Image (cartoon, grey):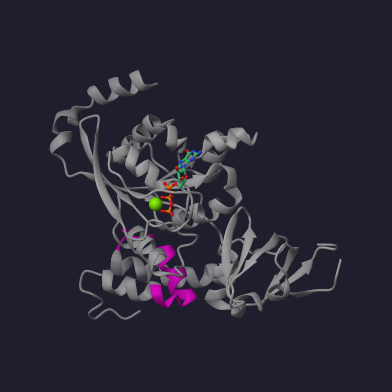
Amino acid sequence: MPIINAVRVLSDKNFKSDCTKKPAVIALAGNPNTGKSTIFNALTGMRQHTGNWPGKTVLRTQGQYIYNGQKYVLVDLPGTYSLLPHSAEEEVARDFLCFSYPDVTVVVVDATCLERNLNLVLQIGEVTRQLILCLNLMDEARRKNLIIDSDLLSRRLGIPVVETAARNGEGLNQLRQTICDVVNHRITPVPTPITYPPDLEQAIAILEPQVRQIMGERLNPRWVALRLIAGDQSFIRSFFSSLPDAGEGVKL
Amino acid sequence: MHACMTLDRLLPGCFALVEEVQAQGITRRRLLDLGLVPGTIIQAIHRSPLGDPTAYQIRGAIIALRQEDTLQIRIIPFEGT
Ligand SMILES: Nc1nc2c(ncn2[C@@H]2O[C@H](COP(=O)(O)OP(=O)(O)OP(=O)(O)O)[C@@H](O)[C@H]2O)c(=O)[nH]1
Ligand SMILES: [Mg+2]
């Protein structure tokens, strides 16, 4: 597999110019305490604070790495249970994921605790298509005799799934390669859409085209419509200040 | 099983089944996002010295909730816990 990939990349016409291209921005998101900073450190060689309790990372931190001659900027985010923020840290994560338009978002989940973690994966899949699921703590999952069908999970979610045990470096090359493949459009994730009850779908159908007119496809217009319908004040504030003309003349 | 009660009355160490989240709007969505979906098993772990908030084990994570929220969650406590 790695050899085939290397061949593919080397035969890529743009390969030489890759090093000078603008670096791709990769966001690391996920629930608290799932190993985001451990992955960040392993990929960038930096030393972000890690430890076995939730809520260690409170600001976003960025670092760089080079893979296959291409430069990546990796952004470590605070842990969050939801894209509806309840604390300043969660707002930092939400704002970056929604309004900074990373080229790829890697959602790092605790493989021993999938049920809890997948909720956020579905939410982020409503915001962006450029999504990779990283099943971390696979060593713990094996120790607990949990068997995860990654291929099925990948098909159901419509996004690539990579298994890692970041603390001992397992799976990190596969992660780098998958990020590279999504950045260079060799893999196209298509997150499985979530359908809402008919009355809500009707309201979305009215709002979505108007949202699209104002801001195009950068942020999934369907997701913006849903936040507006929910009357999510924190989202609406960040949304308006993220618009190029800071909401001037825009009335929704 | 006991009759229904609200989550704030569950004593540390005891288990219960979430029956209904009565909160509305953003609070409701937030509680659902934390894993408090009807049918979830939850355990009270620890009450802070002032009695609020209380830490609960919910679907593999320990999460602190305030009484203003737990008052709005109906549970069925497990017998003998
Ligand atoms: N066994 C095992 N432990 C891991 C793995 N990855 C990370 N850890 C440990 O899990 C704990 C949490 O890791 P962090 O990288 O700090 O997690 P985080 O997601 O950045 O946490 P917050 O910033 O608090 O949200 C640390 O004790 C890590 O050493 C893994 O693959 N296997
Ligand atoms: Mg961290």
Q: Quadrant of the N terminus of chain A?
A: top left
User: Could you say which quadrant of the image residue A124 lies in?
Assistant: bottom left
Q: Is residue A23 left or right of residue A136?
A: left
Tell whether position A98 is magenta.
no
Is residue A198 among what the camera can see? yes
Who's the residue at 50% across and 56% down the image?
A: A120
Residue A233 located within the stretch drawn in magenta = yes
- Which quarter of the figure has residue B63? bottom right
Q: Nearer the viewer, residue A165 or A81?
A: A165
Compare residues B61 and A146 and report the one nearer the observer. Answer: B61
Q: Is residue A106 visible?
A: no
Q: At 66% across and 78% down in the image, what residue appears?
A: B72
> Residue A147 placed where, x, y %?
63, 34
Name the spot of residue B53 as percent of width and height, x first.
58, 73
> Looking at this view, is A98 or B37 the one in front?
B37
What stretch of residues is rendered in magenta?
A: A216-234
The relative height of residue A246 versus residue B60 in the rendered view (above or below) is below
Give the residue drawn at x 53%, y 36%. Answer: A138
Location of the C terminus of chain A (image quadrant): bottom left
Q: Residue at x 34, y 76 (%)?
A: A237
Question: Where is B46 relative to A105, above or below?
Answer: below
Residue at the front extreme of this rendering: B49
Q: Quadrant of ligand 1?
A: top left
Image coordinates for residue A103, horizontal then vertical, percent: 30, 48
User: Please, is residue A229 above or below residue A7 in the view?
Assistant: below
Q: Give the tally of numbered discs.
A: 0
Q: Give the quarter of the image for residue A18.
A: top left
Q: What secondary structure predominates along the stretch shown in magenta?
A: helix
x and y percent of residue A100 in the render? 28, 59
